[in-house]
Image (cartoon, rainbow, N blue to C red):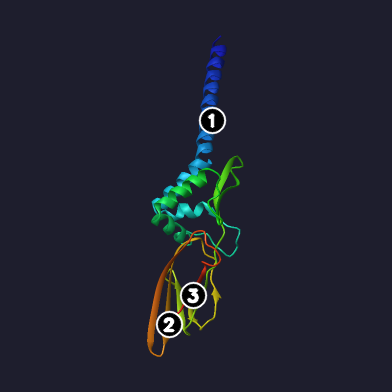
């Protein structure tokens, strides 16, 4: 009789443990299913831009271009653009949460699965390649404070990149005949045409 009561108590404990495990599994599944959903991932991405969290932003971006490395630093121009344009940021959020198609170079797509179960949404980026030339020899070119050309010659066009679509500051400095001329221009290449990616500076 005692052995039967002991067996019954053991069975109840086992059933209780199994129920706890089942509830934990179901709860985890529901939580992760929401966490990795299109809408929740969209919210995390846009919130990360608003909070200047480049690490989270870079973790939610991918590209098929092997020459473009997605890092917290390389995504800064994209973040800068949307930080400076709240209306465009709201449009980005709407489009990511709906069809996923943001524009011709940004597309929020399902790229696979987390843990073989949950959909994995990432912003797929097509990098941009600006071209630059000037009408003076010995022209130094900086893109977002980084020197990309120390001495660009007169009327020579060079292609730079790959870069992520976004906000860029280009500074061109010409040193000729002991005179220094500098021009600084800001470009917002979020969905650029080939023509808009061509930068030409005519120093006077």
Nearer the camera: disc 3 or disc 1: 3
The quadrant in which the N terminus is found is top right
Q: CA distance from mark 3 to mark 2?
A: 13 Å
Label 1 near label 3: C-beta < 8 Å?
no
Secondary structure state at the residue bearing disc 1: helix
Task: Name which residue lies at 42% across and 79% down.
Answer: 173
Say which of marks 2 and 1 sits in front: 2
Location of the C terminus by quadrant is: bottom left
Q: Which residue is mark 1?
A: 26
Residue at x-position 51% and y-position 46%: 95
Compared to 88, does 32 lie above or below?
Answer: above
Q: State if disc 1 and disc 2 touch (CB < 8 Å).
A: no
Calculate the distance from the C-alpha at mark 2 to the C-alpha at mark 1: 65 Å
Image quadrant in which you'd find residue 77:
bottom left
**In the image as oriented, which residue stretches furthest toward the bottom?**
177
Asked if one can make out residue 36 in the rendered structure from this viewpoint, the answer is: no
The 10 Å Cα crowd at callout 2, few under 14, some 14 to 19, many 20 or more, is: many
Which disc is residue 162 wearing? none
Question: Gap in Å between the C-alphas at discs 3 and 1?
Answer: 60 Å
Q: Which residue is mark 3?
A: 200
The residue to which callout 2 is attached is 174
Q: Residues within 10 Å of mark 3 (few under 14, many from 20)?
A: few
Q: Residue at x 44, y 56 (%)?
A: 54
């Amino acid at each position: 009789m005692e052995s039967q009561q002991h067996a019954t108590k053991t069975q109840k404990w086992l059933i209780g443990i199994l129920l706890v495990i089942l509830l934990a599994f179901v709860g985890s599944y529901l939580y992760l299913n929401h966490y990795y959903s299109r809408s929740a991932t969209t919210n995390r991405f846009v919130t990360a831009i608003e909070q200047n969290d480049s690490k989270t932003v870079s973790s939610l971006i991918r590209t098929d271009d092997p020459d473009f490395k997605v890092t917290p630093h390389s995504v800064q121009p994209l973040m800068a653009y949307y930080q400076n344009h709240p209306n465009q940021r709201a449009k980005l959020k709407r489009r990511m949460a709906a069809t996923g198609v943001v524009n011709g170079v940004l597309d929020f797509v399902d790229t696979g699965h987390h843990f073989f179960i949950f959909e994995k949404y990432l912003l797929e980026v097509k990098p941009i390649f600006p071209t630059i030339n000037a009408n003076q020899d010995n022209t130094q070119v900086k893109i977002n404070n980084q020197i990309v050309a120390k001495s660009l010659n007169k009327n020579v066009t060079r292609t730079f990149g790959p870069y992520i679509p976004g906000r860029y500051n280009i500074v061109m400095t010409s040193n000729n005949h002991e005179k220094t001329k500098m021009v600084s221009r800001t470009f917002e290449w979020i969905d650029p045409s080939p023509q808009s990616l061509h930068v030409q500076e005519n120093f006077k």
